[in-house]
Amino acid sequence: MEPRISLITLGVSDLGRARSFYEALGWAGQSVQETVFFQVGGLALVLWDRDRLALDCGVEDQRPAGFGGIALAHNVRSPAEVDQLIATAERAGGTVTRPAATTFYGGYAGVFLDPDGHAWEVAHNPSFPLAADGSLTVPDFDTR
């Protein structure tokens, strides 16, 4: 298997609310067959009804009462961008669970939950510079 992720699908309880939240962050969504697709760099983020997604995956939705075990990350080019995006997410209806602050690795980051509880870290990590197109390359830790 080639190391690649093509689509990330988030199960949501209210498709319209979820779409509005991500569009308030500045993303442009397209509705197709009761899903919403967002082009995010070289992959797509998809919003789909949580029950339908569970059925499609052949699993029973057990809706965790707390953390679902996955966090998405959005790296930015400066600490000021972290603050700006965390504030934008909160105004759009997100919940800030970790206010932006200096990190143990020498960066600056905070975390918000979207309206369905999906965790997003917004981070500026000087060790993970971003290309002009926003893509991130993991540094070679063996040479550090």
Image (cartoon, rainbow, N blue to C red):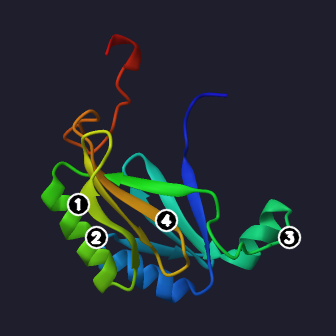
Q: Is residue 72 above or below residue 60?
A: above
Distance, label 3 to label 1, CA atoms, is 36 Å
Q: Residue 86 has which mark?
A: 2
Tell me: residue 104, above or below residue 110. above
- The CA distance from mark 2 to mark 4 is 12 Å
Residue found at the far front of this picture: 104
Task: Residue 24 in the image: state x and y as whole percent.
Answer: 31, 80
| Camera-nearest label, 4 or 3 | 4
As measured in the structure, the alpha-carbon distance from the residue carrying label 4 to the one carrying label 3 is 21 Å
Contact, mark 1 vs mark 2 (Cβ under 8 Å) = yes
Residue identifier under label 1: 82
Q: Earlier in the sequence, mark 3 or mark 1?
A: 3
Residue type highlighted by circle 2: Ile
Callout 2 crowding tier (Cα within 10 Å): few <14, some 14–19, many ≥20: many
Total residue callouts? 4
**Residue highlighted by disc 4:** 119
Q: Which residue is mark 3?
A: 60
Describe the element under mark 1 as helix, strand or loop: helix
Say which element carries label 4. strand
On the image, the x and y values in percent for residue 112 come to 40, 70
Quarter in which the N terminus is drawn: top right
Labelled pair 3, 2 in contact (Cβ < 8 Å): no
